[in-house]
Image (cartoon, coloured by chain):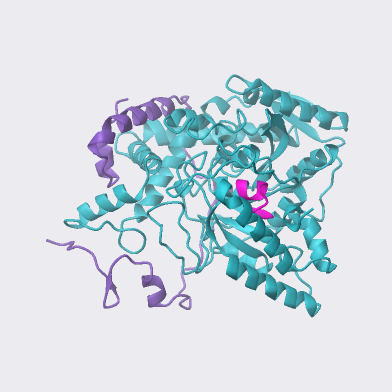
Amino acid sequence: MNIDIKHVAKLARLRIEDEKLSKFENDMQAIVNMVENLPEIKEELVLDKDNAMVLRHDTAEIRKFTRDELLKNAPHIQAGCLVVPKTVE
Amino acid sequence: MELYEKSAHELSEMLKNKKCSAVELTESVFKRISDVEEKVDAYLTICKDTALEEAKKVDEKLSIGEKLHPLAGIPIGIKDNISTKGIKTTCASKMLGEYVPPFDASVMNKIKSADMVITGKLNMDEFAMGSSTENSYFKTTKNPYDLSRIPGGSSGGSAAAVAAGEAVVSLGSDTGGSIRQPAAYCGVVGLKPTYGSVSRYGLVAFASSLDQIGPIGRNVTDVAMLQSVICGHDKMDATSKNIEYPDFTKSLSSNVKGLKIGIPKEYFGKGIDSSVKTSVMNAVKELENNGAVVKEISLPSTDYAINAYYILSSAEASSNLARFDGVKYGYRTENYNGLVDMYEKTRSEGFGDEVKRRIMLGTFVLSSGYYDAYYKKAKLLQKKISDEFNGAFSDVDIIATPTTPSAAFKIGENIGDPLKMYATDICTVTINIAGLPAVSLPCGKDNGMPVGMQFIANKFNEQTLLNAAFGYEQIVGGFNSVAAIK
């Protein structure tokens, strides 16, 4: 299986610098060649009911964090809001 | 013997009987850190001031006769992908280089409730992807037994710190061997608990269906004590199993008489150094001489396990790491032109090459047209591997294998070749795929470098696992030695 690195990188929102591209292509090709060797198992995937996740009730909890605490790690804030580039044309 | 060299259970008795104070113990560990950390490079963040404050509080509580947890006052290092409130949690990545969590992981709440003393945050491969700590954005940790060699990974800092006496015990995380492999290379004991027995809340996610936090120590008792602290149901983790968890220390027994040990031939084939095979088989022989029953078994799907592991773990990683987009927290590129440009530059500058490879592999196997050929096949194989283990455990109590194919390799030896690096996980990945508990323990040396043996048990049978490990430890007269750093 040949892998189109530029296309996959685009899907993953990554860019590979030109000088690294050929090494990346070779490495990724080798990895894909390795992992594609898997046996054919003629079964269907079924949910593992014994290990089903137990979700919490969908109820509101008392706020654990203040707005300021959560914004402390944001790369760019203004007037208590996250600043992002224009997203709607 | 200095305090930092002693085991957690010895120190626990000493603290209780006022033979030393928690402050003296903490100072001893930090003296050791200042003596050897420059050579070992195990830590990313050192928390000396807060550790001494925590130790002082333990001494105050002890002085008024308060009954404390057995691990109160014991210095512990934490892998840097476990969220620690107010202490940087970088995952050894530029992406989270300045990130300070506003909350504690559930395991940290338990560590704090037990009044353990947090020494700092330990180096690792970036986002736990790697087998040597060479993928850390910040530095490569050195093996305390030979500073020109890797300590293993991804929890390389956690294993090296304990081996070097820079912490009495530590926490690591294990997705495909990341606790057991460095424990083997550094000559310490590392437990990967059953999936679902330790809460993952606050562990920065790599592959959520495989990740598990676990303890590292210089002997089996310390590991059993720490596992008893961190396990248990947590409503904050939907995969946490709600069952009764025993105190593993209380029932620790060294009696191996009648213990049925399976030896899977697939783990002793080509690719495994003959010195490693010999060390493991000699250890098994010792157990047999003490009454254990040894039986050859077969786990035929093992040969495909590494392939399935890289598909499943990378698929989950590609999804989990999509959150790092430079918006709410973490690194953001400086100059960008529009939203997509910001995402791409942020992620390309913030992630290292190995993380990018895994994200791209995961994106590829999940992309349109390839799902059936890769992810679905790997999921079916996962079930087959689990079924094979289930079959084996109807016949044996534990399974013994090497932890790694060889002793620790040289820094730089495998970093240019991802496939060679991936192959070092060949004995450990199956256990995560099947969600089983497994422990690595020292079983000899190869040219002065530690060799590790892995015991595997059925789900939630940590007691059987730890008893077998404790039995072996007693036979060889105890582990617990701190590496002399040269």
Drawn colour of chain A?
Answer: purple
Q: What residue sits 81% from the left and 43% below the top? A: B478
B251 vs B134, nearest the viewer: B134
Q: Quadrant of residue B312?
A: top left
Q: Is residue B426 left or right of residue B389?
A: left
Q: What residue sits 65% from the left and 65% below the top? A: B117
Q: Is residue B105 left or right of residue A60?
A: right
In the rendered image, residue A51, in percent from the top left (x then y), is placed at 57, 49
B316 vs B48, nearest the viewer: B48
Q: Is residue B230 visible?
A: no
In the rendered image, residue B223, in percent from the top left (x then y), is placed at 71, 51
In the rendered image, residue B476, in percent from the top left (x then y), is placed at 82, 37
B187 vs B310, nearest the viewer: B187
Residue B166 covered by magenta stretch: yes
Q: Is residue B219 visible?
A: yes
Number of numbered discs on residues: 0
Q: The magenta stretch spans which residues? A: B160-170
Q: Height in image: B352 above or below B47?
A: above
Q: Quadrant of residue B377?
A: top left
Q: Is residue B410 left or right of residue B453?
A: left
Q: Is residue B17 left or right of residue B241?
A: right
Q: Height in image: B236 above or below B191?
A: below
Quadrant occupied by the C terminus of chain B:
top right
Q: What residue sits 62% from the left and 55% below the top? A: B33
Residue A71 covered by magenta stretch: no
Q: Which chain is cyan?
A: B
In the rendered image, residue B190, in percent from the top left (x then y), is placed at 66, 45
B156 vs B297, nearest the viewer: B156
Task: Work out which residue is located at the far bottom of the displayed protein and give it.
Answer: B64
